[in-house]
Amino acid sequence: MESIDNYNFSGKRALIRVDFNVPLDTDLNVTDNTRIKAAIPTIKKVLSHGGSVVLMSHLGRPKNGPETKFSLSNIVDEVSDLVGINVKFATDCIGNDIQKMVQNLQAGEILLLENLRFHREEKKGDDNFAKQLSELGDVYINDAFGTAHRAHASTTVIAQFFPNDKMFGYLIEKEIASVSKIMANSKKPVTAIIGGAKISSKIIIIENLLDKVDNIIIGGGMAYTFAKAQGGSVGNSLIEEDFIETAAIILKKAQTKGVQILIPTDSVAADNFSNEAKTLTCSTNNIPDGYMGLDIGEKAIAENVACILNSKTILWNGPMGVFEMSKFQKGTEEIARAVATATSNGAFSLVGGGDSVAAINKFNLANEVSHVSTGGGAMLEYLEGKELPGIQAIQG
């Protein structure tokens, strides 16, 4: 395994797996370029040291071959603007014509390949497809953390064809270092903020964190399964009946390990799932029938903010409520601002998971935290302690 900082890129073609799976509007314009921006430092590193760049990525979930709405041609202008160079585009990612384009690539130039997933072999992890891709570069750089948990041809299988010339890009290096600061090298107190709708999707993470953190703040829909496990009445709030016992076990484990779990003291409850709903603030353990908890209340906000501001290491995954509706966004916004304040006071903060990233962006605080992860699923699996194929392929 090489290091991007020590490798000599002069005269070399760097084949870089990026994650340019960005959202497009109905006119096929990029609406959020965060993932493209995240790859720019790696691309510029290669170019500034005399190399050329071949970029490969997927976009969306095409079902049966090429589809215009999933073509990476839609993002060429955005990539060109961000990197400051006119990016060339290849209408496929393998084949003789593409090989010729690559061979004609000069130092300082960039070629973006067409969507990898227009070929079914990509997701299948096909050896031959990976080999054809490998022939397009002298060195392989994986900088697509968002797909590192997938054993696809371009993220994992391809690495075997670069036994001595493979490495991580700056983005993946930062992602690995950030998770390591939470799981292995954290400064105490360590606080994990875990929100979202369902406890079932976060059980493994919570259990894995019990040996790593001092506090776990619970928010979102999953809070009501925990409240139910404590014997509370949660009205019509979202609960997972099959996981009430699991929640109770987690609470007992936390107590045994000396980990404080903060379940919202109070909630903003509504008589229906709507921004126009009738609302009231009440104890989370005593929500009236006909009402559902859709955000944390003022007391819970104050308790959570105090905990966050006292922390030196913070992980945030999942919102506190239905922040997409203005009536139920205060809890998530106040938590976001507390994380930003703690960071400015010297804490390390990692924000990851789609909804958390959406929230931190909504409140314009992405630059106020230590790191915003570009890989929701990959980050969660990494936090669960799983080995990610895309990481292993480089490290192994």
Image (tube, rainbow, N blue to C red):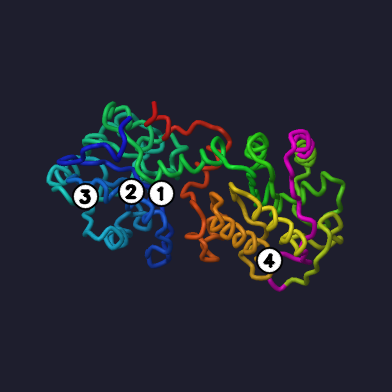
Q: Residue 207, image x and y in percent?
A: 67, 36
- Is label 3 in contact with label 2 (beta carbons under 8 Å)? no
Name the image quarter holding the C terminus: top left
Secondary element at tag 1: loop
Q: Relative to residue 225, is residue 131 depicted above or below?
A: above
Mark 2: amino acid: Asn
Of the residues under marks 2 and 4, which one precedes in the sequence?
2
Of the residues under marks 1 and 4, which one precedes in the sequence?
1
Q: Residue 395, image x and y in percent?
A: 39, 29
**Which residue position holds label 4?**
328
Of the residues under marks 3 and 1, which one precedes in the sequence?
3
Residue at image location 48% in from the left, 46% down from the top: 375
**Which residue position holds label 1?**
62
Mark linked to residue 115: 2
Secondary element at tag 4: helix
Identify the magenta region: 251-276
Q: Nearer the viewer, mark 3 or mark 2?
A: 3
- Is label 2 in contact with label 1 (beta carbons under 8 Å)? yes
Q: Residue 20, image x and y in percent?
A: 37, 52
Q: Quadrant of residue 273?
A: bottom right
Q: Is residue 275 magenta?
A: yes
- The CA span between labels 3 and 2 is 26 Å
